[in-house]
Amino acid sequence: MDLGLRDRVAVIAGGSGGLGLAVARELLREGADVAICARDPGRLAAAERELRALARGRVLAARVDVRDGAELRGWVDRVAAETGRLDIAVTNSGGPPIGYPTEFDVAAYRDAADTVLYPAIGLALAALPHLRARGWGRLLFIASETVVRPVADLTLSGVVRTGILRFAQGLVAELGASGVTVNVLAPAYLRTGPVERAAADLAARRGSDVETCVREMARHIPLGRIGHPEEFAALAAFLASERAGFITGTVQLVDGGACAAGGLPSHLGFTRDVFQ
């Protein structure tokens, strides 16, 4: 299937690892040019080398602190100026600390918003003038399952990521027939770095093996396994494509059916501390 992504230009926040890097790989394979940003120069350089090895589209990498609104806008504008266009923007960030509501003070809630909510809004606002000017664009917000259902000890995530959802939904009505679509991706457990580290730490404490602990983490998932970043990235690439032109305003769960089945995420209780 030709997704019509050849020569499209995408900016991806948090593109040096995890889901952001997976999305960058997938878009490159489809022929797009990608610009990634991250704060850690070492991880950013490694990601750039990996992406360049795919040798399909152009790869741009920049050290950017997405919590700095001016720095974020400057990066987006530079990418658009250097490539001559901007078509796709993917917001992405790490998760805030795990814990119950009263375990945090107001400063922790404010920091979660500064780390997760405001960078997503900032990237969208920086990208939209470029997308609207072209009359075609895709905004993808990477959030989490907490935008769909409450998870007791993911309070900070639920508060700030639900804010992302409401912002995205507001954009849908405002953008109307502009040619720019807006969708929210809501992943649950995928085999990214934090999950791998959690499984390894749990295995070490129990004297077990990593794969056994990964399977235990997946006990609430009807498909019986943890998802792979590549599966998530395939969905992101489709939503970023020509083929998805009539899909906007949606929340796309990537959770193996866990929310539909009412299962509790396995970090409640036994893995909570290793995700900190």
Image (spheres, helix red, strand yellow):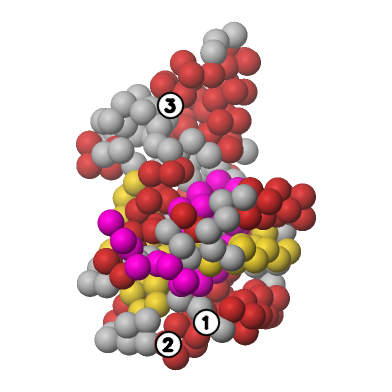
Which amino acid type corresponds to the residue marked 2 in the rendered image?
Answer: Arg
Answer left or right for 73 relative to 192: right
Span colored in magenta: 1-27
Q: Is mark 3 on a helix, strand or loop?
A: helix
Answer left or right for 46 relative to 138: right
- Quarter-of-image position of residue 163: bottom left
Q: What element carries label 2?
A: helix
**Does the residue at mark 2 contact the one at mark 1 (Cβ under 8 Å)?**
yes
* Residue that protrudes farthest toward the front in the picture: 55
Q: Quadrant of the C terminus?
A: top right
Q: Which residue is denoted by mark 2 in the rendering?
A: 134
Which amino acid type corresponds to the residue marked 3 in the rendered image?
Answer: Met
**Does the residue at mark 2 contact the one at mark 3 (Cβ under 8 Å)?**
no
Q: Which residue is denoted by mark 3 in the rendering?
A: 217
CA gap, disc 2 and disc 3:
44 Å
Q: Earlier in the sequence, mark 2 or mark 1?
A: 1
Residue occupying image coordinates x 35% and y 24%: 219
Q: Position of residue 266 (x, y in %)?
A: 42, 30
Q: Residues within 10 Å of mark 3 (few under 14, many from 20)?
A: many
Q: Earlier in the sequence, mark 1 or mark 3?
A: 1
Mark number displayed over residue 85: 1
